[in-house]
Amino acid sequence: MSFITTKENQTAVAAPPANLPNAKNDYQLPENPLVVIEPRSGWVPLNLREFWQYRDLLYILMMRDIKVRYKQTLLGALWAIIQPLFTMLIFTLFFGKLAGMPSDGIPYPLFAYAGLLPWTFFSNAVTNSGNSLVGNSSLITKIYFPRMIIPMASVASGLLDFLIAFGLLVVLMFYYSVGLSINILILPFLIILTSLLAIGIGMWMSALNVKFRDVRYALPFLIQIGMFATPIIYPSSLVPDKWRWLLALNPLTGQIEAYRSAFFGRPFDWFALGISTVLTLAILFYAAFTFRRMEKSFADVV
Amino acid sequence: MKPIIKVENLSKNYVLGGEQKPYSTLRESLVDAARKPLKMLRRGQSKDTNNFWALRDVNFEVMPGEVVGIIGRNGAGKSTLLKILSRITEPTSGRIELYGRVGALLEVGTGFHPELTGRENIFLNGAILGMRQAEIARKFDEIVDFAEIEQFLDTPVKHYSSGMYTRLAFAVAANLEPEVLIVDEVLAVGDAVFQKKCLGKMKSVSDKEGRTVLFVSHNMAAVKSICRRGIMLKSGSLEFEGDSISAVDFYMQGGSDLSSFQDWTETEMPGNDSIKIRKASVCAKEKSIGEPILTSDDFVFEIEFYNNIDNGDIDVTWDLMNVQGIHVAHIGTICAQNGLSRGWHKTSATFPRNLLNTERYTFSVQFGRNQRELLFRMEDILTFDIEDGIQRSGSSFHKFPGVIHPVCKWQTITAV
């Protein structure tokens, strides 16, 4: 800043229309525009650079969701355990005890809980992120930021619940004296993979939800179906060999089985996990590009 | 010198149906898609009447360090322009080049979460506005200072008074450091002292820090005092561009049209599934429409509408604004005690004489149900002048200051 005009100076200049500001501005204009705003059509690049610039927002929105989730609840974060625990108890009663469901030689409660743990994370993540854009409409219509951050933060905020519920798994394993093995080291990779799948589906659903509120009603229903289409309460070994491929088309199948292998130290089905990874990435990319294509109308439609 | 903002042939088109039905269901889309070709066959053409140009071929440039006021009536396209500039929505055609980072403040407290504390909301709001966490932490004390909320920092903001809430929100935004700051009407809230503080802050942002500010407001006094340049929009087009004082003058003297009488044909009637408006007018009592309304006249304002709700508990509410953007009155009535029948109705009211000052006014009208649910609102349905009715011997026209100018009963007695 070379000099600062005083108030008197300014009134003395007594502005004609083309009055240009004087040399007090030390910001150097770049040669090319930083941003060009133009109508876009068709497929839009993902613009990950900008996404990276807003990474703090992702973190803060995630923290917001975590902080707000159990505000004004009596049991607080216990809910993270209650949901999978009680589902496990019910399934143990009906499928384990009454129906005598096989569980690959692992005590059925443990078997079911190990499947319910990632499933609960996944289904909550998809539900929350599917409704996230509509729920944050006040942000979307008032401020610009990469919209993908909203459904992503919803998924990320479920990770804490996952970790809490994982704590209970460790307790259960101790109770049933099943030891952890080196296989557990793959857990971070599995969590990332499940998160990416949840982000893909959640992001896609959230974009559709902006335009079609049917999603809000369809989603819980689809998730319920998804639970039975995934080997959670039954082992995939229960499915006849010739139908196994159908089960493997569900990207969660390979992941859930891999979680069990990781927890109980059994061999991994790398082929199923590979299919799952490929499918997950395919869904993620498709969802991301679809989202980018739809996002320009969010503020007008939501 | 190169401009920091360059707007070229900017247009934005909205399809009007989309406004009344903010979202569609899948079934409707499918049915629409199936019907569309049929409809086109039947009518022999696609209908194009629902299109509404919120902005049309707007061109302007802003130099670095300039403070530009954007004025215009409600619906002139100001908000749309800001939304495009801040990249919330896309233009239909045209192009904007931005040579600096843009920080937009379209609403105070965007993203504030009521359950979170003041401290948490500062970080949340800052991040939403595009600040890095470290940047917010550095400015934290300054923000708290400006907002004057030290002792409530760890209280959830849902317990804040609306004044505290506004102060905190503005404080966060005022500490943004983009090269271009876009501000929309944030000064319409908060008490007078705080408004002054905000205006001062905006002035210093441009004067001392040399940043560019785009400021949309109905507060003409604020536009005149803060801005150097003014841009006036009217029905989506740029109507006037010049120094802010001329722009405000232009706006206040007939830059906007008068419309003391509205009469719509069947196809054009504004409204929705519940309410349709056919006519609206404002007129001095016992005079005909179009004759000047004097301060000494009672004036009648009325509206004819179709109520499509069986025995609905319908209310009509009018918002009277003056051209300075001051909300003068919010008046209304419940149309019938035991529900209003389906069909055409006319509601009228008489506004007492010798109360309003000479000024240009606009009425907006809204229909509600059960005094809660908004059925339909139309901004600026009527615009009219109230002229000086006092016969004065002096020759020069003189407008009294103040929003109202009631005729009072005066008395002077000898005091002992």
Image (cartoon, rainbow, N blue to C red):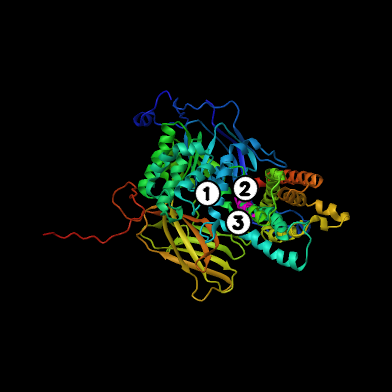
- What residue lies at 51% left-to-right and 45% top-to-bottom? B124
* Residue A132 image offset from top left, x and y in percent: 62, 52
Q: Quadrant of residue A117?
A: bottom right
- What residue is at 46 percent from the left and 68 percent from the top? B333
Q: Secondary structure at mark 3?
A: helix
Q: Are marks 2 and 1 on the same chain?
A: no
In the picture, measured across the screen, residue B184 lies left or right of residue A214, that is: left
To which residue does mark 1 refer? B111
Q: Residue furthest top?
A: A2
Find out whether residue A160 is within the magenta segment. Answer: yes
Asked if both marks, 2 and 3, belong to the same chain, the answer given is yes
Q: Using the image, name the chain to which the residue with label 2 belongs.
A: A
- Foreground mark, 3 or 1? 3
Q: Which mark is residue B78?
A: none
Judged from this view, the residue extending furthest toward the front is A177
Q: Which mark is residue A156?
A: 2
Q: How many marks?
A: 3
Q: Earlier in the sequence, mark 2 or mark 3?
A: 3
Q: Amino acid at mark 3?
A: Ala
- Which residue position holds label 3? A80
Question: In this image, B237 relative to A219: left or right?
Answer: left
Closer to the observer: label 2 or label 1?
2
Kindly identify which chain the residue marked by label 1 belongs to. Answer: B
Give the magenta range. A155-168
Residue at image point 87% right, 54% down: A241
Within-10-Å neighbours for mark 3: few <14, some 14–19, many 20+ = many
